[in-house]
């Protein structure tokens, strides 16, 4: 359930259909500390908690062109969805990201919603309108495509990986 602060945040979402069973996709997502393997914007990540998944799991991520952020699981429904909170950095005061998987035939629909707050008042809002929202969306789309590629091939994604242009 969203609190008042979260409902006032900016929102970006996306989804992708992956030709793999839910369990295969969930296993990749549930390894919370290993996001660097499939998210092209993450140059390095590692668990900062004893458990690598589930309630209480946390990680540190180094994000290309952005710096380091700390993230921790705030909600976990095994095999279905989870939400994590990310620390603020630059113009972003903090963020929440919810990842869900759902069977669709023999495939898996992955849905993501990112909510983020802004710093710097009207300047932050302008920055969001001009640049930031588009960058968050591109990073999300790249991450979904990277997840799809990683689940299919087992290959780690490099920072030069980009989502195909919609067309």
Image: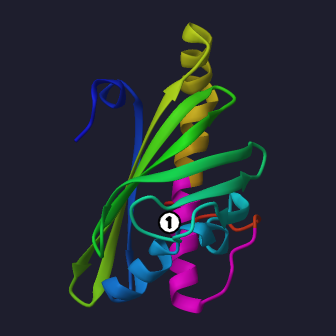
Tell me what residue is drawn at x 56 percent, y 26 percent: 128
Q: Can I make out residue 165 in this image?
A: no
The answer to whether residue 104 is above or below residue 74 is below
Tell me what residue is drawn at x 59 percent, y 30 percent: 92
Quadrant occupied by the N terminus: top left
Q: Which residues are magenta?
A: 140-158
Instruction: Name, please, the residue furthest toward the front.
Output: 50
Query: Residue 2, how many percent across, how many down?
Result: 26, 37
Query: Residue 138, how many percent across, how many down?
Result: 57, 50
Query: Residue 54, how many percent across, how many down?
Result: 40, 67
Query: Circle 1 sits on which residue?
Result: 144
The answer to whether residue 59 is above or below residue 67 is below
Left or right position of 77 against 43: left
Query: Residue 136, how many percent across, how many down?
Result: 56, 43
Quarter-of-image position of residue 157? bottom right
Residue 36 forms part of the magenta stretch: no
Please tell me whether mark 1 sits on a helix, a strand or a loop: helix
């Amino acid at each position: 359930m969203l609190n008042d602060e979260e409902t006032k945040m900016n929102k970006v979402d996306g989804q992708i259909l992956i030709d793999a069973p839910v369990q295969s996709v969930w296993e990749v997502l549930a390894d919370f500390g290993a996001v660097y393997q499939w998210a092209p914007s993450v140059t390095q990540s590692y668990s900062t908690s004893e458990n690598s998944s589930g309630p209480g799991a946390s990680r540190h991520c180094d994000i290309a062109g952005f710096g380091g952020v700390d993230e921790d699981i705030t909600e976990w429904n095994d095999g279905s969805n989870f939400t994590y909170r990310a620390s603020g950095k630059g113009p972003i005061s903090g963020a929440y990201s919810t990842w869900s998987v759902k069977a669709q035939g023999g495939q898996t629909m992955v849905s993501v919603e990112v909510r983020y707050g802004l710093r710097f008042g009207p300047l932050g809002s302008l920055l969001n309108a001009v640049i930031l929202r588009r960058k968050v969306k591109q990073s999300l789309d790249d991450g979904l495509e990277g997840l799809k590629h990683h689940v299919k091939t087992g290959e780690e994604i490099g920072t030069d990986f980009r989502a195909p242009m919609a067309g």
